[in-house]
Image (spheres, rainbow, N blue to C red):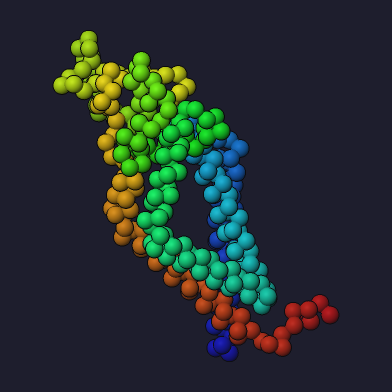
Amino acid sequence: MAMKGCLSVTKYFLFVFNLFFFILGGVLLCFGLWILFDRSSFALMIGSSTPTLKIWSYVLSGVGILTMLLGFLGCLGSLKEIKCLLGFYFAFLLLLFAAQITVGVLIYTQRSSLNVAVGKYVENIIKNYGILTNQTELQESLDFAQEQMSCCGWFTPEDWMKNQKISENTSVSLYPCSCRNISSFIPNTNINGTANGTDISEPLLEHGSGFCTTTSRDNWPVYKTGCMNSIQAFIINNFICIIGVCIGIALLELFVMTLSMCLCRNLDQNYNKLARYS
């Protein structure tokens, strides 16, 4: 009797838990589809770039679909006591857990190679910025990252000197507007707009190019930190929170896998679901 009561509690706990996950997955999927089909108005509402929102819409939609699938398997398998679905549920969680461990280990062990690969990728975007029309979304995503993280380039702001427009333009000094350090500008300056050799006048934007003009070619009014350093600083500052979240997710997955395995193993071996319909 006690065993049946324990199994009932386990069954309904799994059902309620996975019902919540199914609803959460549906919300994520709807939110991702909303961003995907209505990016323009959503971008204006939160002040973000459209390509960045497009990436997030795909991420949210994918996570929503996987969460709904996981919740469906857990709900139906636990409520109807179907061993096959419980087995799929356990296997799916185990695969997800193994994938998370694998990704974490690869990122840690290959962090140097990953850093170099990402650096080359960003440098290629910087080099062709404003030139290749097929990289517009990547370029706007880079702009968004530089604006939000207050950084410029990947390693240093000098990475932008490899850009063809900046290096080939000798008539006027150009720099990326997304790197612009607002604190470097002081309104109502003198006629030359300079102080101590630093350009502090309001910049002129080249329409549709993403570049701004400055009178000083050697001292751009931009952030002096590369985005790689900004990302590393963010991870270090939030290291405890990131580790805590990862450990919490891993423990939750292990707990739910244990419950599903116990429920599946303790179901009556001679119980036939089709008997009720005969």
Q: Residue at x 42, y 35 (%)?
A: 126
Query: Residue 211: image x %, image y %?
Result: 40, 24
Res 91 quadrant in image: bottom right
Residue at the spot x=29%, y=49% of the render?
233
> Which quadrant would the C terminus be assigned to in this image?
bottom right
Q: Residue furthest top?
A: 191
Q: Quick check: 71 left or right of 195?
A: right
Q: Quadrant of the N terminus?
A: bottom right
Residue occupying image coordinates x 25% and y 26%? 219
Q: On screen, 213 above or below 259?
A: above
* Quarter of the rendering containing residue 198: top left
Query: Where residue 199 sits in the image (x, y, percent)?
Result: 24, 21
The quadrant in which residue 195 appears is: top left
Q: Position of residue 151 (x, y in %)?
A: 32, 38
The residue at the point 57 percent across, 65 percent down is: 18
Is residue 238 shown left or right of residue 29? left
> Is 171 rendered above or below residue 10?
above
Taking 25 as reference, is 209 above or below it? above
In-front residue for pair 144/161: 161
Q: Residue furthest left?
A: 196
**Is residue 55 at least partly visible in the picture?**
yes
Q: Nearer the viewer, residue 17 or 156?
A: 156
The percent coordinates of residue 30 (x first, y second) are 59, 47
Out of 76 and 148, give the one closest to the viewer: 148
Q: Is residue 214 left or right of residue 43?
A: left
The residue lying furthest to the right in this view is 278
Residue 48 in view of the camera: no
